[in-house]
Image: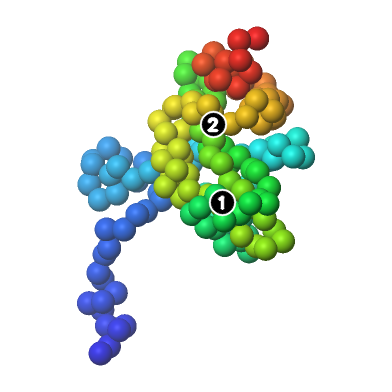
Amino acid sequence: MDLLNNDNLKKKTGGFNILSGDSTSGHGGYGAGVMNLDNVSPVFVDPAEGEAFVDMGALHARSAVEKRIKFLPNKEDVPNGKLYWLVWVAIQYKESKPYYAGVAGCEMTVDTEIRRGYKSLPEHVNKMDKSLKGKILVDDMDSKSKKILADFLKKHNEAMWNHSDKELHEALLGAE
């Protein structure tokens, strides 16, 4: 069997693609409806250290937190795991100004000593999608983590924070 013949090379798959920009120019053909990750950033919140940081490797489960860790589907299998929140932050524009439109937090625990962790991959994918659609989903996060995230977003770009909806401010800081 010749694996490198031209017929095999020309075959297209209908698999999941990540495209930059609008590849379809509105025609709705091949690639239409593909998720565009240009305006989403993964922000890790580490409540134990009181810090938040961006790690773009998380878009493909290759962040510094996730490297060399085997993730298990049961939280109970990682009893000594350190808590992290992976928060998908999506940027949109209104009135020609950028703002934090979608913010969705996902729980993750990591035990570096045994190189095991817990995360729910379907939850991570679904919350990334919700973030891209402008949803605010941080109810699962503890108050300390929400405050760390709010401070990080403000510090990162105060104008974007101020231009964001009140729903985000209330979800992260309560009714201040």
Which quadrant of the rendered structure holds the C terminus?
top right
Q: Is residue 80 above or below residue 11?
A: above
Q: What percent of the width, then of the height, locates residue 73? A: 48, 54
Amino acid tagged 2: Asp
- Please identify the quarter of the rendering in which residue 48 is found: top right
Q: Which residue is painted at 44% across and 27% down in the image?
A: 134
Residue 164, horizontal then vertical, whole percent:
55, 18
Label 1 amino acid?
Glu
Task: Determine whether, in the image, residue 3 is placed left or right of residue 173.
Answer: left
Q: For this view, does 27 lie left or right of residue 17?
A: left
Taking the image as drawn, is residue 143 in sight? yes
Tell me, for residue 89, which label it has, or none: none
Q: Nearer the viewer, residue 72 or 44?
A: 72
Of mark 1 and mark 2, the one earlier in the sequence is: 1
Whether residue 117 is situated above or below residue 169 in the rendered picture: below
**Residue 95 spot, x, y in % from top left:** 48, 15
Is residue 103 visible in the rendered image? The answer is no
Residue at left offset 31%, top offset 83%? 4
Mark 1 and mark 2 residues within 8 Å of each other at the beta carbon:
no
- The quadrant of the picture occupied by the N terminus is bottom left
Foreground mark, 1 or 2, reads 1
Could you tell me which secondary element the residue under label 2 belongs to? loop
**To which quarter of the image does residue 168 belong?**
top right
Dot 2 corresponds to which residue? 140
Q: Which residue is mark 1?
A: 76
